[in-house]
C-alpha cells in the first residue's frame, strides 16, 4: 500500500519497516517515519533524546519527516505521550523485543544470486532446521559452514524455523513479536541475507517458517497501536488476530507486507505458513487467498519461482486448490496423516492422535493419498474428518518422519531413531523418500542424530510467564500418558543445549550407515523418474496385517516392506527377473514370484532399466 510510491515531485519513497526512506533524484535528504495507530490522539517518533510530532494522514497512518543522518537510526514510537515502543514493523531489533528499533537500508546489501532460480517443489527434497541448535554457535554464519553437507546429501531446499525477533536468546521462534526483524542473536538482517545468499550459491533454495496465527506474549505491543486483535474469535493463544473485523484491512496489509518483504528483500524462495487452521477469518476473500494472489503478483514482477506451503490439520484440499476455482491457492500443504500412519506402524504407539492409526491398511492408504482421514470417522475427534483430495498431485503435499512438532512435542523430544531400531527407521525413510509426495527431513535425521529436539524458551526475566509455560507443557501431554516429571523444564539452559546437533557423530556408526542410506534414497528418487511422479492414481498397494508386509507399486518399481520380527515372503506382480535397486539389509532375494525378506527390512525393485521419457538405468 505504501511501498514504492512516487511522490508529487517524481521521487521514489520506499517503505522499510516503520520508516519510509525518501530519495530525491540527486541525493538522499529526509527519512519519513510512518506508523498505523487509528485510535491515537497524538503520536511521536523518538530518535535519541528528541521526540518529533507526527501528522495524521489517511486511514489512521501517522507520518513525520526527519533529517536523514545516514546509517542505522534507532527509533521508537510514543502513543498519546506514553512509553516509547518498538515499531510494529521494525526491520531490526538490536536491543531485544522491548528496545528501540533500528532502520535498515536493504539496497546496501550486495547480493550474488542475480540469476538464481529455485527447483520446483515436484522435484524437491526439503530440510527443516533450527538456526539456534543446528550448530554449536547457533548463528546464521555458523549454519553457512554446514551447507556443503546438505548440498552433498542431495537436499534442494532448506526450511528454517521462525527467525522473527522473540524474547530471550533461545527458543523455537513461534513466539515472535517483531515479525519484520530477523533475530539479532542469530546475526540480524545482514546475517540472514548472507545465509540466504550462501544457500543460493550452493544450489539450495531457502524457505522461511512464518507465524500468522498469533504472536508471542513478551514484547507484544501491537494492541497499543491498533485493533490487531479481536475478542470475537478465540485461538489457543487468546484473542485471534483481526482478519475480518473493523479496521482489518490494515491488519491484513501488515501480514501480507511481511510475507512480501521476506520474499523480496531477503530473497527467500518461499514461506511455510504455521498452523493456518488457527487463522480465524470469515471474509469472502480469506487472508490465505489474498496472500497467495499477492505472492503470485510478486513472482511475476521478480521473475522468480516463489512458493507458499501451509501447515493445516483440516485435511481440506481447498487449501491447495488454485484460488481461481475457489481454493486458497497455496502451493503445498504439510500432511500429518502420512507421518502418523508411518509412525504408528513403526513404533506401535496408540495414544493421543495416534489412536486413529496403527494398521497397515492405514499405511497403505497414506501411500496413495495424503489424507488417511478423507471424510472418515475419527475416534479421536469423535466425528468425520477431512475430504478426499481428488485430482491433486502428490507434489501438493509435504511429508516427513520427523519435524520440530513431532519430535519437540513429545515429553522428552525423542527422534524416531530413538524409539525404534535402525532397521525400522530405514523402512520409514524409504516409504517417505519414495512416496508420491514432497519429502522433508528434520535436522540430523539423515544420520540418526542422538540429540533429541526438546521445547525450550528463555524467559528468565519474566519468571511468572516462564512458570506458566512450564505448567502448560506438562499438562499438554496427559493424552499421551507421559508423566509431568518426564517433561524437561523448557526454561533450563540444559534443555536447549542437549537439543544441539553433535556433528562429530556423522563419521561414526551407526550414524554413518544411516547417512549412507539417506544418500542412496535421495539419489534413487532423483534418478528414477517414477519416484518424482505425483500421480497418486497410478500407485497400487497390497498388504497382509498378519504377516506384517506391505508392497507399494509405482509403475514398474516396487517398494516391499517387512515389518515383522521374522523372515517373510512378499508376493510380487508383473514380470520376473527384476533388479534389486536398494535393500536395507543383506539376505534379500527374489525367488519366482516372491521376494524373500529378512525381519524389519525394505527393498526397492524394478526392471533392469526403466523406460519413460528416455532411458534411465542405475
Image: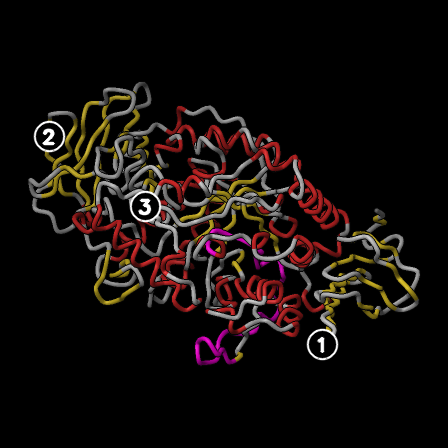
Q: Position of residue 436 (x, y in %)?
A: 67, 60
Residue placed furthest toward the front: 485
Q: Position of residue 332 (x, y in %)?
A: 54, 57
Q: Position of residue 468 (x, y in %)?
A: 25, 55
Q: Is residue 300 visible?
A: no
User: Disc 3 to disc 2, how far (Cα)?
Assistant: 38 Å
Reading the image, the residue beneath label 2 is 51
Q: How is the image coloured?
A: secondary structure
SS assignment at label 2: strand
Q: Is residue 61 left or right of residue 206?
A: left
Give the camera-side residue of 374 and 602: 602
SS assignment at label 3: loop
Q: Which residues are magenta?
A: 377-405
Give the camera-side residue of 228 and 498: 498
Instruction: Indicate whether 444 appears above or below 23.
Output: below
Task: Specify whether residue 382 is painted magenta.
Answer: yes
Reading the image, the residue beneath label 1 is 546
Label annotation for residue 491: 3
Q: Earlier in the sequence, mark 1 or mark 3?
A: 3
Amino acid at each position: 500500500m505504501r511501498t514504492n510510491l512516487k511522490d508529487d515531485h517524481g521521487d521514489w519513497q520506499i517503505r522499510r519497516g516503520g520508516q519510509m526512506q525518501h530519495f530525491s533524484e540527486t541525493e538522499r535528504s529526509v527519512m519519513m517515519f510512518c506508523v498505523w495507530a487509528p485510535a491515537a490522539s497524538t503520536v511521536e517518533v523518538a530518535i535519541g533524546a528528541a521526540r518529533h510530532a507526527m501528522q495524521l494522514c489517511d486511514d489512521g497512518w501517522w507520518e513525520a519527516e526527519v533529517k536523514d543522518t545516514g546509517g542505522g537510526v534507532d527509533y521508537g514510537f510514543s502513543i498519546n505521550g506514553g512509553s516509547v515502543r518498538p515499531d510494529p514493523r521494525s526491520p531490526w531489533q538490536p536491543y531485544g523485543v522491548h528496545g528501540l528499533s533500528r532502520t535498515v537500508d536493504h539496497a546496501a546489501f550486495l547480493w550474488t544470486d542475480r540469476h538464481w532460480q529455485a527447483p520446483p517443489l515436484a522435484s524437491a527434497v526439503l530440510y527443516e532446521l533450527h538456526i539456534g541448535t543446528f550448530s554449536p554457535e547457533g548463528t546464521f554464519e555458523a549454519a553457512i559452514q554446514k551447507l556443503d553437507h546438505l548440498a552433498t546429501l542431495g537436499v534442494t531446499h532448506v526450511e528454517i524455523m521462525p527467525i522473527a525477533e522473540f524474547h530471550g536468546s533461545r527458543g523455537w521462534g513461534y513466539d515472535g513479536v517483531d515479525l519484520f526483524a530477523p533475530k539479532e542473536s542469530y546475526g540480524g538482517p545482514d546475517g540472514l541475507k548472507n545465509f540466504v545468499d550462501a544457500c543460493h550459491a550452493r544450489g539450495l533454495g531457502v524457505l522461511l517458517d512464518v507465524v500468522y496465527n498469533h504472536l508471542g506474549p513478551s514484547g507484544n505491543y501491537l494492541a497499543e497501536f491498533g485493533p490487531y486483535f479481536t475478542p470475537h474469535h478465540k485461538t489457543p493463544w487468546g484473542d485471534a488476530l483481526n482478519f475480518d473485523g473493523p479496521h482489518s484491512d490494515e491488519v491484513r496489509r501488515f501480514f501480507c507486507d511481511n510475507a512480501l518483504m521476506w520474499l523480496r528483500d531477503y530473497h527467500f524462495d518461499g514461506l511455510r505458513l504455521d498452523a493456518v487452521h488457527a487463522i480465524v477469518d470469515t471474509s469472502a476473500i480469506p487472508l490465505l487467498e489474498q496472500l497467495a494472489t499477492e505472492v503470485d503478483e510478486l513472482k511475476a514482477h521478480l521473475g522468480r519461482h516463489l512458493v507458499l506451503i501451509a501447515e493445516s490439520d483440516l485435511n481440506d484440499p481447498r487449501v491447495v486448490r488454485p484460488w481461481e476455482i475457489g481454493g486458497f491457492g497455496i502451493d503445498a500443504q504439510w500432511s500429518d496423516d502420512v507421518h502418523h500412519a508411518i509412525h504408528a506402524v513403526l513404533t506401535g504407539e496408540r495414544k493421543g492422535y495416534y489412536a486413529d492409526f496403527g494398521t497397515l491398511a492405514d499405511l497403505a492408504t497414506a501411500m496413495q493419498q495424503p489424507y488417511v482421514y478423507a471424510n472418515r470417522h475419527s475416534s479421536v475427534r469423535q466425528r468425520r474428518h477431512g475430504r478426499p483430495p481428488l485430482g491433486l498431485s502428490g507434489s501438493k503435499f509435504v511429508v516427513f518422519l520427523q519435524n520440530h512438532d513431532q519430535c519437540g512435542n513429545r515429553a522428552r523430544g525423542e527422534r524416531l531413531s530413538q524409539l525404534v531400531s535402525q532397521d525400522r527407521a530405514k523402512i520409514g525413510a524409504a516409504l517417505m523418500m519414495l512416496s508420491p509426495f514432497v519429502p522433508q527431513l528434520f535436522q540430523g535425521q539423515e544420520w540418526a542424530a542422538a540429540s533429541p529436539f526438546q521445547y525450550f524458551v528463555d524467559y528468565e526475566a519474566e519468571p511468572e510467564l516462564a512458570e506458566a509455560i512450564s505448567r502448560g507443557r506438562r499438562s499438554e501431554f496427559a493424552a499421551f500418558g507421559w508423566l509431568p516429571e518426564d517433561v524437561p523444564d523448557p526454561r533450563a539452559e540444559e534443555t536447549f543445549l542437549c537439543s544441539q546437533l553433535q556433528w562429530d557423530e556423522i563419521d561414526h556408526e551407526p550414524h554413518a550407515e544411516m547417512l549412507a542410506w539417506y544418500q542412496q534414497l535421495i539419489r534413487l528418487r532423483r534418478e528414477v523418474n517414477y519416484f518424482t511422479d505425483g500421480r497418486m492414481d497410478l500407485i497400487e498397494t497390497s498388504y497382509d496385517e498378519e504377516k506384517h508386509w506391505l508392497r507399494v507399486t509405482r509403475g514398474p518399481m516396487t517398494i516391499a516392506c517387512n515389518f515383522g520380527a521374522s523372515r517373510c515372503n512378499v508376493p510380487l506382480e508383473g514380470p520376473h527377473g527384476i533388479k534389486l535397486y536398494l535393500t536395507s539389509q543383506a539376505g534379500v532375494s527374489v525367488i519366482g514370484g516372491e521376494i524373500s525378506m529378512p525381519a524389519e527390512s525394505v527393498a526397492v525393485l524394478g526392471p533392469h532399466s526403466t523406460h519413460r521419457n528416455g532411458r534411465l538405468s542405475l
